[in-house]
Amino acid sequence: MRTFFVILFAAILAGCSGSTPYDNVPTANVSANATTSPKPPDTSDSPTPSVLFTIDPGGPTERMIREGYGDEQIRQNIADIDKSITYALLDKNADKYEGFAWGFTGKILQIFERNGQTKALVEFKPNQNFWLYANFPTDFVKGNRIYAVGYLHGTETYETIAKWQLTIPVLIPRAMIKPQDLAKYKSFKK
């Protein structure tokens, strides 16, 4: 009888491990490198079932792949930001600003990485969140503060833990930078 309870207890512990589909996501501490260094995407024709998102032909990701992810492209992207676009405008109609350069500082609430792609839920301000779809891996983890710069890409609706449906803006980042390292990129003039 005692053996039965030991086995039962072990089975209960194994079932309550709190594992999620994202447990195998590799994570690392933020390195001294201020930006993520993207690698060219896998352009093979074979479908990959574990990708986080697909690249829209002619969309922001394809544009950045074509232009590059170097320091000069990051500086130009920051210089091109349309400062008249507010979160309230994006909340009202993000599709209107599709493809516009934008950037913000925020805190990573959730982050997932698969096959060289990163998807992160980032808090811009309380109750103002963004999805980031990056076509590169990153060293940033949940809880890190980042500056993301890239191009606006409509909205995504998702279900929260409380079963609410939320629709929030999407930014396709060219770079995710430590906020304290942002000054070196802002010295660029148009």
Image (cartoon, grey):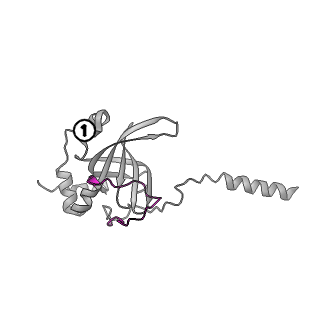
- Taking the magenta stretch, the answer to whether it contains residue 41 is yes
Q: Residues within 10 Å of mark 1 (few under 14, many from 20)?
A: few
Q: Percent position (x, y) of residue 14?
A: 68, 56
Q: Is residue 8 left or right of residue 182?
A: right
Q: Quadrant of residue 10?
A: bottom right
Residue under the image location 17 percent in, 50 percent down: 80
Placement of 145 over or under 157, stated as above or below: below
- Residue 48 appears in view: yes
Q: Percent position (x, y) of residue 71?
A: 22, 62
Placement of 40 over or under 178, stated as above or below: below
- Taking the magenta stretch, the answer to whether it contains residue 14 is no
Name the residue carrying label 1: 96
The magenta segment is 39-60
Q: Percent position (x, y) of residue 60?
A: 27, 53
Residue at the extreme front of the image, as rendered:
45
Q: Amino acid at mark 1?
A: Lys
Q: Secondary structure at mark 1?
A: helix
Q: Is residue 4 left or right of residue 142?
A: right
Q: Percent position (x, y) of residue 129?
A: 37, 41
